Image (cartoon, rainbow, N blue to C red):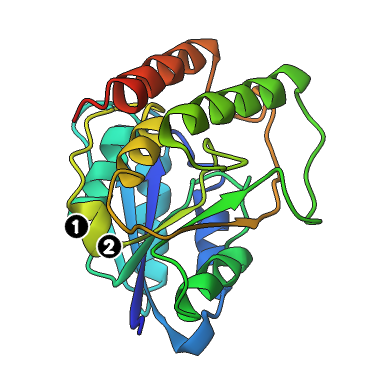
Amino acid sequence: MINKLSIVIPSYNEGATIYRILDKVKAVRLLNDIEKEILIINDCSSDNTKESILDYITQNKDLNIKYFEHEFNKGKGAALRTGIENATGDYLIIQDADLEYDPEEYNDLLKPVLNGFADVVYGSRFMGSNPHRVLFFWHSIGNKFLTFLSNMFTNINLTDMETCYKLFRTDIIKNINLRENRFGFEPEVTAKITRIPGIRIYEVGVSYYGRTYHEGKKIGWKDGLRAIYCILKYGLLRID
C-alpha cells in the first residue's frame, strides 16, 4: 500500500526551468490517487532559482511543497541527502529540476511496486520504445561503461545505473549511509542498495529529453572519473 510519494528535486541554477518541471509534477495524477509530497533543495544557486521556487509555492498553496536551502553549494548528492532525510512518503523518487525526464512516467515506475514485485525501481534510458533525444556518442558510451563496471561488482544486470529516475522504498533509502556529495551518488547508492538481503530491484524504460551543455547540462568528464572511483570504492571494496 502506497499512500504518499515523496518527490525529491535537487536544484542548482535552474531558475529558467524549475517552474516548468513543477508544473509537470503538479499535473501528473498518480495511480490509486497516491498523494504527492514535493521536496525542493536549492543547492545555493547563484541565479533566480530561489525566487522562482518561492514564487511558485506562493501561487500553488494547494501543493504539498517543502523548500530547503543550502548555505553553500554542496553538490547533487548532498542535496539528495537533505531531501531523503526530510521525506515522509512511503516511497521516494528522484526528479532533476531540468526537463530531461518526464514526470508523467512516475506511474510506470510505480507499477512494479503496486503489483507487489519491487522495493526499488530504476528508469532506464537504454531500454523500451520511449522517445530519446539523440545527443553525445561518448556520453552514451561512458554511461554504458559505468553501468557495466558497476554491474561487475554488484552482480546485477542494470542497463542504466546513472539514470536520474530511481524509486526507493523510503524506509530502505533512509537507512543507507550515503556519503557522496556530487554525482557519485548514483554508483554509491546502487552498490549499497544491492547489498541488502532480499532486495527486489526492477527496471523500466523511460523517455529522455537530454540537454546540451549550452542548454545547461552540468555533468562532465571529472564526474565520470569520480564515478569509476566510487564504483571501485563501494562496489569492489564494499566500503560503507
Taking depth in this image into account, of 94 and 226 the one nearest to the observer is: 226
Seen in the image, is 4 located left or right of residue 68? right
Residue 228 appearing in the image: yes
Q: Tell me the element at label 1.
A: helix
Image coordinates of residue 30 in percent, x first then y, are 51, 79
Q: Residue sitting at 26 percent across and 53 percent down?
A: 173
161 is higher (above) or lower (below) than 64:
above
Quadrant where the image shows the C terminus: top left
Quadrant hosting residue 154: top left
Q: Which residue of the protein is positioned furthest toward the bottom in this rendering? A: 32
Quadrant hosting residue 45: top left
Image coordinates of residue 203 in percent, x first then y, are 57, 55
107 is higher (above) or lower (below) than 136:
below
The type of residue carrying mark 2 is Thr
Seen in the image, is 30 located left or right of residue 66? right
The residue to which callout 2 is attached is 170
Taking depth in this image into account, of 119 and 46 the one nearest to the observer is: 119
Quadrant where the image shows the N terminus: bottom left
7 is higher (above) or lower (below) than 70:
below
- The label shown at residue 86 is 1
The CA span between labels 1 and 2 is 10 Å
Residue 12 appearing in the image: no
Image coordinates of residue 36 in percent, x first then y, are 39, 74
Q: Tell me the element at label 2.
A: helix
Q: Residue sitting at 57 percent across and 74 percent down?
A: 27
Q: Earlier in the sequence, mark 1 or mark 2?
A: 1
Quadrant hosting residue 56: bottom left
Image coordinates of residue 74 in percent, x first then y, are 26, 27
